[in-house]
Amino acid sequence: MKAYELLYFVAPTTEDDVRAAVQTRIETVVKDAKGQIDNVEDWGRRKLAYEVNGLTDADYILVDFHTDPTNIAELDRVLRITDAVARHMIVARTDRD
């Protein structure tokens, strides 16, 4: 399994139960592929460099995890169709393998 880092942000007006549902869905996708979540950090509200979907600031969440590389496409698909996630980025971390 390889190490990955996922950074995504949601609108600051997003309710806590919706945020929890997004995090649960991410964990489910990773664990269904026999992966594991290493760490989840809530970075809080940050100002965006430019307006994204009408947002000028957003709440950031960083997720460190290990999974099989074939699972990344499914995770990316799930994040793209999740309305609460405004933007996301998945990066391979070769320094943590």
Image (cartoon, rainbow, N blue to C red):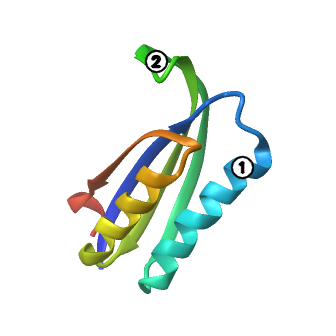
Q: Is residue 31 left or right of residue 16?
A: left
Q: Position of residue 32 (x, y in %)?
A: 49, 83
Q: Amino acid at mark 2?
A: Leu
Q: Earlier in the sequence, mark 1 or mark 2?
A: 1
Q: Residue furthest left?
A: 94
**Disc 1 element:** helix
Q: Are marks 1 and 2 in contact (CB under 8 Å)?
A: no
Location of residue 93 with respect to 54 vertically, above or below: below
Q: Residue visible at 38% across and 72% down?
A: 66
Q: Is residue 75 left or right of residue 32?
A: left
Residue that numbered label 2 is attached to: 48
Instruction: Give whichever of 39, 20 is nearer the camera.
Output: 20
Q: Residue visible at 61% across and 56% down?
A: 22
Location of residue 23 with respect to 28 vertically, above or below: above
Residue 36's disc number? none
Residue that numbered label 1 is attached to: 18
Instruction: Give whichever of 17, 69 is nearer the camera.
Output: 17
**Disc 2 element:** strand
Number of residues whose C-alpha sits closer than 10 Å to that of mark 1, classed few (under 14), some (14–19) or many (20 or more): few
Position of the N terminus by quadrant: bottom left
Q: Residue visible at 25% across and 58% down?
A: 92
